[in-house]
Image: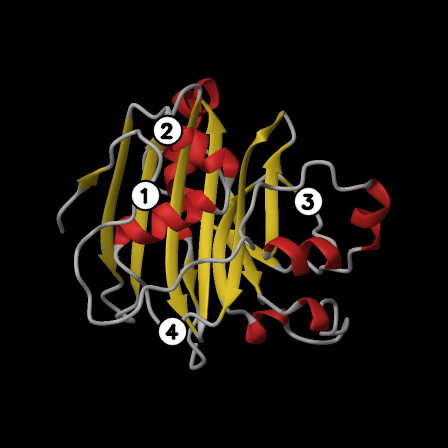
Amino acid sequence: MATKIFSPTPPVISSTSATTKTPVLPKAIVSRCLGTSLSAVVAATAVLTMVPALPAAGEGNQAYKLYYGTAASAANYGGYGGNSDRKTSAEYVYDVPEGWKERLVSKVEKGTNGTDSEFYNPKKRTEKEYLTFLSGFRQLAPRDVILNNLALSDVELQDLIAGADKVVSEEKKDEETGQVYYLYEIDGVGKHSLITVTCAKNKLYAHFVNAPAPEWNRDQDTLTHLRDSFKTVSSSS
C-alpha cells in the first residue's frame, strides 16, 4: 500500500473529489481527561477481563494480557453484570503489557469524549494506550481526512502533528476477516504516537499508543506490538 507523509502544518482536508459525503468527527474524541477526579474513577464500574498473550519475537521477556473491550454506550455502562462473559460481548481486543495499570473510565467521561478503555505504564504515566469510539460511522473516509478530523477534535494531537518531523500513514487489511485499518505514525517533538482507526458495527474505533521520546526509543518494539495487536471482533468470533 502507498505510504503518505503529511506536512507538519495545521491539518488540511484533502481536496480529492469523492462521491460520498465525508463524515466529520464531532468533538467527541478529545484530549484525555487527565484531571478526572479520584471519586469519578472509583465510581467507574468497568470490568477487566484479560488472558495471557505471548510476546512477539524480538521483544525479550515482555509478556502481555489480552484485553476485551465492549464499547458499550454510556447509558449501558457497567450494565453487563458480574456473571456475564465479557469475552462473548467484546467488540475489540488489544494486548496490554504485564505490569501496566488500568485507568478506569467514568461514565461521564465515556459519554463526553468516547473513551472506552485506557492503560498506562505506572513508571511513566504518559506512556499509555487507550481506545475511543463513536457511533454512526458505516465506513472509513480517506486516510488524510480521518487524521485531519481527529486532529481538529484533539488539540494535543493537532499540536503534535503541527510540530512533527514525520507523519506516515498506511492502509492495512486483515487477510482473515477482510477488515480494513488505517495506521498512522507521528514522530513529534518529544513524543511519538501510533494510531489505528477502523469502522465496524456502525462505529468508528480509534486506538492510540503514545509515549515520550525516551520511552519510545526504549520500548519501540513493545509499543509497536501494542499497535499491531488491536483488532475488532466479529459477531461470529
| Coloring basis for residues | secondary structure
* Sequence-first disc among 4 and 1: 4
| Measured Cα–Cα span from mark 2 to mark 4 | 29 Å
- Residue 223 higher or lower than 197, as above or below: above
Which label was assigned to residue 162? 2
* Sequence-first disc among 3 and 2: 3
Q: Secondary structure at mark 2?
A: helix
Residue picked out by circle 4 = 138
* Sequence-first disc among 2 and 4: 4
Q: Residue furthest left?
A: 2
| Measured Cα–Cα span from mark 2 to mark 1 | 15 Å
Q: Is residue 34 left or right of residue 148?
A: right
Going 45% across and 54% down the picture, which residue do you hit? 206
- Residue 84 higher or lower than 36, as above or below: below
Q: Is residue 60 visible?
A: no
- Whether tag 4 and tag 1 are in contact, CB under 8 A, the answer is no
Location of residue 207 in the rendering, given as x and y in whole percent from the top left corner = 46, 50
Residue picked out by circle 3 = 103
Nearer-the-camera pick, 89 or 165: 165
Location of residue 113 in the rendering, given as x and y in whole percent from the top left corner = 61, 53
* Sequence-first disc among 2 and 1: 2
- Whether tag 1 and tag 3 are in contact, CB under 8 A, the answer is no
Location of residue 29 in the rendering, given as x and y in whole percent from the top left corner = 53, 51
Going 39% across and 21% down the picture, which residue do you hit? 217
Q: Amino acid at mark 2?
A: Ala
Tell me the mark number nearer the camera, choosing from 4 and 3. Answer: 4
Q: Amino acid at mark 4?
A: Arg
